Amino acid sequence: MTYALELKDLRKSFGKTEIIRGANLAVNAGERVAIIGPNGAGKSTLFNLISGRFGPTSGEILLNGQSIANKKPYEINRMGLSRSFQITNIFPKLSVFENLRCAVLWSLGYKYTFLKFLSGLRDANAQAEQFMAMIKLDKKRDVLAMNLTYAEQRALEIGITIAGGSDVILLDEPTAGMSKSETTRFISLIKSVTEGKTLLTVEHDMGVVFGLADKIAVVVYGEVIAFDVPEAVRSNPKVQEAYLGAPAEQGGH
Protein backbone atom coordinates (compact mmCIF):
# COMPACT_ATOMS: atom_id res chain seq x y z
CA MET A 1 0.00 0.00 0.00
CA THR A 2 1.24 3.49 -0.88
CA TYR A 3 0.74 6.11 1.83
CA ALA A 4 0.61 9.86 1.35
CA LEU A 5 3.42 10.13 3.91
CA GLU A 6 5.38 7.35 5.55
CA LEU A 7 8.23 7.38 8.07
CA LYS A 8 10.25 4.18 8.50
CA ASP A 9 12.62 3.85 11.46
CA LEU A 10 13.49 7.53 11.11
CA ARG A 11 16.42 8.75 13.22
CA LYS A 12 18.14 12.09 13.68
CA SER A 13 21.16 12.81 15.85
CA PHE A 14 22.88 16.11 16.57
CA GLY A 15 26.38 15.11 17.58
CA LYS A 16 25.99 12.34 20.13
CA THR A 17 22.45 13.34 21.03
CA GLU A 18 19.72 11.31 19.31
CA ILE A 19 16.56 13.42 18.99
CA ILE A 20 14.43 11.21 16.73
CA ARG A 21 14.79 7.58 17.76
CA GLY A 22 13.25 5.27 15.21
CA ALA A 23 10.00 7.06 14.43
CA ASN A 24 7.42 5.17 12.37
CA LEU A 25 4.26 6.68 10.92
CA ALA A 26 1.98 5.89 7.95
CA VAL A 27 -0.56 8.53 6.92
CA ASN A 28 -3.27 7.76 4.38
CA ALA A 29 -4.19 10.24 1.66
CA GLY A 30 -6.81 12.71 2.89
CA GLU A 31 -6.24 12.10 6.61
CA ARG A 32 -5.88 14.97 9.05
CA VAL A 33 -3.22 14.09 11.62
CA ALA A 34 -2.25 16.11 14.70
CA ILE A 35 1.22 15.52 16.12
CA ILE A 36 1.34 16.10 19.86
CA GLY A 37 3.80 15.44 22.66
CA PRO A 38 5.54 17.04 25.64
CA ASN A 39 8.01 19.89 25.13
CA GLY A 40 11.28 18.56 23.79
CA ALA A 41 9.66 15.40 22.40
CA GLY A 42 11.03 16.02 18.90
CA LYS A 43 7.91 17.30 17.12
CA SER A 44 9.59 20.27 15.44
CA THR A 45 12.60 18.13 14.47
CA LEU A 46 10.20 15.64 12.88
CA PHE A 47 8.58 18.44 10.84
CA ASN A 48 12.02 19.73 9.84
CA LEU A 49 13.01 16.27 8.63
CA ILE A 50 9.81 15.79 6.63
CA SER A 51 10.05 19.22 4.99
CA GLY A 52 13.76 18.91 4.18
CA ARG A 53 15.25 21.48 6.55
CA PHE A 54 17.22 18.65 8.15
CA GLY A 55 18.50 15.45 6.59
CA PRO A 56 17.90 12.23 8.57
CA THR A 57 20.75 10.32 10.19
CA SER A 58 19.07 7.11 9.00
CA GLY A 59 15.68 5.76 8.04
CA GLU A 60 13.23 6.59 5.27
CA ILE A 61 10.75 9.36 4.50
CA LEU A 62 8.35 8.53 1.67
CA LEU A 63 5.98 10.99 -0.01
CA ASN A 64 3.40 9.13 -2.09
CA GLY A 65 5.82 6.20 -2.18
CA GLN A 66 8.85 8.24 -3.30
CA SER A 67 11.83 8.87 -1.05
CA ILE A 68 12.32 12.52 -0.02
CA ALA A 69 15.06 11.92 2.56
CA ASN A 70 17.97 14.32 1.96
CA LYS A 71 16.14 16.25 -0.74
CA LYS A 72 16.14 20.04 -0.57
CA PRO A 73 12.97 21.80 0.68
CA TYR A 74 12.13 23.22 -2.75
CA GLU A 75 12.49 19.76 -4.33
CA ILE A 76 10.11 18.29 -1.76
CA ASN A 77 7.69 21.14 -2.36
CA ARG A 78 7.67 20.40 -6.10
CA MET A 79 6.90 16.77 -5.29
CA GLY A 80 3.70 17.83 -3.54
CA LEU A 81 4.39 18.86 0.07
CA SER A 82 4.02 22.37 1.51
CA ARG A 83 4.70 23.66 5.00
CA SER A 84 3.78 26.68 7.10
CA PHE A 85 5.85 27.78 10.08
CA GLN A 86 5.32 28.81 13.72
CA ILE A 87 6.53 32.30 12.79
CA THR A 88 4.33 33.81 10.09
CA ASN A 89 6.17 33.67 6.76
CA ILE A 90 4.64 36.02 4.17
CA PHE A 91 5.74 38.85 1.85
CA PRO A 92 4.91 41.84 4.11
CA LYS A 93 5.20 44.54 1.42
CA LEU A 94 3.02 42.76 -1.11
CA SER A 95 -0.78 42.83 -1.04
CA VAL A 96 -2.91 39.84 -0.09
CA PHE A 97 -3.65 39.22 -3.77
CA GLU A 98 0.02 39.54 -4.80
CA ASN A 99 1.11 37.09 -2.08
CA LEU A 100 -1.33 34.47 -3.34
CA ARG A 101 -0.51 35.08 -7.00
CA CYS A 102 3.17 34.45 -6.25
CA ALA A 103 2.17 31.16 -4.63
CA VAL A 104 0.24 29.81 -7.62
CA LEU A 105 2.79 30.66 -10.33
CA TRP A 106 4.97 27.55 -10.04
CA SER A 107 2.05 25.13 -9.96
CA LEU A 108 0.77 26.68 -13.19
CA GLY A 109 4.11 26.16 -14.91
CA TYR A 110 5.30 29.77 -15.03
CA LYS A 111 8.29 29.12 -12.76
CA TYR A 112 10.45 32.25 -12.60
CA THR A 113 10.55 33.23 -16.29
CA PHE A 114 7.82 35.60 -17.39
CA LEU A 115 7.18 36.37 -21.05
CA LYS A 116 4.44 38.87 -20.22
CA PHE A 117 3.35 41.01 -17.31
CA LEU A 118 1.82 39.27 -14.31
CA SER A 119 -1.41 41.20 -14.81
CA GLY A 120 -1.86 39.32 -18.08
CA LEU A 121 -1.68 35.87 -16.48
CA ARG A 122 -5.41 35.25 -16.34
CA ASP A 123 -5.21 31.75 -14.89
CA ALA A 124 -2.83 32.85 -12.10
CA ASN A 125 -5.01 35.85 -11.30
CA ALA A 126 -8.16 33.73 -11.26
CA GLN A 127 -6.62 31.14 -8.94
CA ALA A 128 -5.29 33.84 -6.61
CA GLU A 129 -8.80 35.30 -6.41
CA GLN A 130 -10.21 31.84 -5.68
CA PHE A 131 -7.78 31.16 -2.82
CA MET A 132 -8.33 34.64 -1.45
CA ALA A 133 -12.04 33.91 -1.18
CA MET A 134 -11.36 30.52 0.43
CA ILE A 135 -9.35 32.12 3.25
CA LYS A 136 -11.99 34.89 3.54
CA LEU A 137 -9.60 37.74 2.75
CA ASP A 138 -11.25 38.88 -0.49
CA LYS A 139 -12.31 42.13 1.19
CA LYS A 140 -8.63 42.76 2.02
CA ARG A 141 -7.47 42.13 -1.56
CA ASP A 142 -5.21 45.16 -1.93
CA VAL A 143 -4.13 45.53 1.70
CA LEU A 144 -0.41 45.03 2.30
CA ALA A 145 0.22 41.82 4.23
CA MET A 146 2.07 43.70 6.97
CA ASN A 147 -1.10 45.70 7.70
CA LEU A 148 -3.29 42.63 8.34
CA THR A 149 -4.19 41.48 11.83
CA TYR A 150 -2.21 38.56 13.25
CA ALA A 151 -5.02 36.09 12.58
CA GLU A 152 -5.39 37.40 9.02
CA GLN A 153 -1.66 37.01 8.43
CA ARG A 154 -1.87 33.39 9.63
CA ALA A 155 -4.82 32.82 7.28
CA LEU A 156 -2.82 34.31 4.42
CA GLU A 157 0.13 32.03 5.18
CA ILE A 158 -2.13 29.00 5.05
CA GLY A 159 -3.54 30.31 1.78
CA ILE A 160 0.01 30.58 0.39
CA THR A 161 0.77 27.07 1.66
CA ILE A 162 -2.18 25.47 -0.14
CA ALA A 163 -2.04 27.70 -3.24
CA GLY A 164 1.07 25.92 -4.49
CA GLY A 165 -1.07 22.91 -5.32
CA SER A 166 0.46 20.45 -2.84
CA ASP A 167 -1.52 17.42 -1.73
CA VAL A 168 0.29 17.10 1.62
CA ILE A 169 0.17 20.11 3.94
CA LEU A 170 2.23 20.61 7.12
CA LEU A 171 1.03 23.30 9.55
CA ASP A 172 3.27 24.17 12.49
CA GLU A 173 1.16 25.42 15.43
CA PRO A 174 -1.28 27.27 13.16
CA THR A 175 -3.37 28.74 16.01
CA ALA A 176 -0.49 29.85 18.27
CA GLY A 177 -1.10 33.32 19.71
CA MET A 178 -4.77 33.45 18.78
CA SER A 179 -7.71 34.20 21.03
CA LYS A 180 -10.29 31.50 21.72
CA SER A 181 -12.76 32.97 19.23
CA GLU A 182 -10.07 33.36 16.56
CA THR A 183 -8.98 29.76 17.17
CA THR A 184 -12.52 28.47 16.71
CA ARG A 185 -12.88 30.29 13.40
CA PHE A 186 -9.43 29.15 12.31
CA ILE A 187 -10.20 25.48 12.89
CA SER A 188 -13.19 25.85 10.59
CA LEU A 189 -11.03 27.63 8.01
CA ILE A 190 -8.33 24.94 8.08
CA LYS A 191 -10.93 22.21 7.65
CA SER A 192 -12.40 24.03 4.67
CA VAL A 193 -9.21 24.86 2.78
CA THR A 194 -7.58 21.46 3.32
CA GLU A 195 -10.62 19.46 2.25
CA GLY A 196 -9.43 16.40 0.33
CA LYS A 197 -5.78 17.03 1.19
CA THR A 198 -3.50 15.22 3.63
CA LEU A 199 -2.82 17.39 6.67
CA LEU A 200 -0.23 17.10 9.42
CA THR A 201 -0.20 19.72 12.15
CA VAL A 202 1.90 20.21 15.26
CA GLU A 203 -0.40 21.66 17.90
CA HIS A 204 -0.34 22.25 21.67
CA ASP A 205 -3.97 23.33 22.04
CA MET A 206 -5.86 20.11 22.70
CA GLY A 207 -9.13 21.76 21.76
CA VAL A 208 -7.68 22.31 18.28
CA VAL A 209 -6.33 18.76 18.19
CA PHE A 210 -9.66 17.10 19.00
CA GLY A 211 -11.60 19.55 16.83
CA LEU A 212 -9.47 19.06 13.75
CA ALA A 213 -7.73 15.69 13.66
CA ASP A 214 -8.96 12.38 12.25
CA LYS A 215 -5.99 10.74 13.97
CA ILE A 216 -3.41 11.78 16.57
CA ALA A 217 0.26 10.82 16.60
CA VAL A 218 1.89 11.11 20.02
CA VAL A 219 5.65 11.73 19.98
CA VAL A 220 7.65 11.12 23.17
CA TYR A 221 11.46 11.09 23.32
CA GLY A 222 11.69 10.97 19.54
CA GLU A 223 9.36 8.00 19.04
CA VAL A 224 5.73 7.73 17.95
CA ILE A 225 4.24 5.91 20.96
CA ALA A 226 0.63 6.04 19.75
CA PHE A 227 -1.17 6.71 16.46
CA ASP A 228 -4.93 6.31 16.40
CA VAL A 229 -8.29 8.07 16.38
CA PRO A 230 -8.66 10.77 19.08
CA GLU A 231 -10.73 8.79 21.57
CA ALA A 232 -8.38 5.81 21.45
CA VAL A 233 -5.38 8.08 21.99
CA ARG A 234 -7.10 9.87 24.87
CA SER A 235 -7.58 6.57 26.72
CA ASN A 236 -4.17 5.07 25.84
CA PRO A 237 -2.22 4.27 29.05
CA LYS A 238 1.13 5.10 27.44
CA VAL A 239 -0.17 8.54 26.48
CA GLN A 240 -1.57 9.14 29.94
CA GLU A 241 1.77 8.17 31.43
CA ALA A 242 3.66 10.52 29.13
CA TYR A 243 1.42 13.49 29.93
CA LEU A 244 0.31 12.82 33.50
CA GLY A 245 3.16 10.75 34.92
CA ALA A 246 0.77 7.89 35.73
CA PRO A 247 2.26 4.36 35.50
CA ALA A 248 1.14 2.64 32.30
CA GLU A 249 0.55 -0.67 34.04
CA GLN A 250 -2.07 0.99 36.27
CA GLY A 251 -4.13 2.05 33.30
CA GLY A 252 -3.06 5.67 33.58
CA HIS A 253 -4.82 6.37 36.87
Image: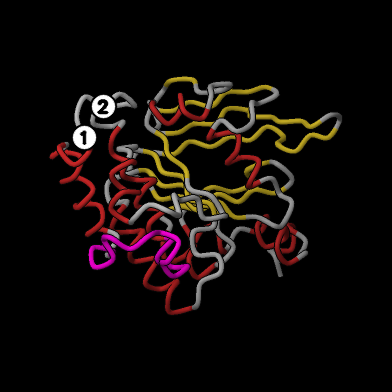
Residue 87 is situated, as x and y percent measured from the top left of the image, at 57, 55
- Identify the residue at image location x=79%, y=34%: 18
Q: What number of labels is visible?
A: 2
Residue 206 is situated, as x and y percent measured from the top left of the image, at 54, 67
Above or below: residue 152 compared with residue 8:
below
What sort of colour scheme is used for the picture? secondary structure
Toward which corner of the image does residue 79 lie, by quadrant? top left
Residue 13 is situated, as x and y percent measured from the top left of the image, at 76, 30
Mark 1 neighbour class, 10 Å CA radius: few under 14, some 14 to 19, many 20 or more: few
Of the numbered discs in the image, which one, if any, rests on residue 114? 2
Tell me the quadrant of the picture where the C terminus can be found.
bottom right
- Identify the residue at image location x=44%, y=68%: 151
Of the numbered discs in the image, which one, if any, rests on residue 117? 1
**Contact check, label 2 and label 1, Cβ < 8 Å:** yes
Q: Give left or right: position of 187 versus 132.
A: right
- Magenta residues, as a range? 137-154
Q: CA distance from mark 2 to mark 1?
A: 7 Å
Q: Residue furthest front?
A: 117
Residue 46 is situated, as x and y percent measured from the top left of the image, at 61, 40
At label 1, the amino acid type is Phe
Above or below: residue 100 compared with residue 49:
below
- Identify the residue at image location x=45%, y=61%: 146
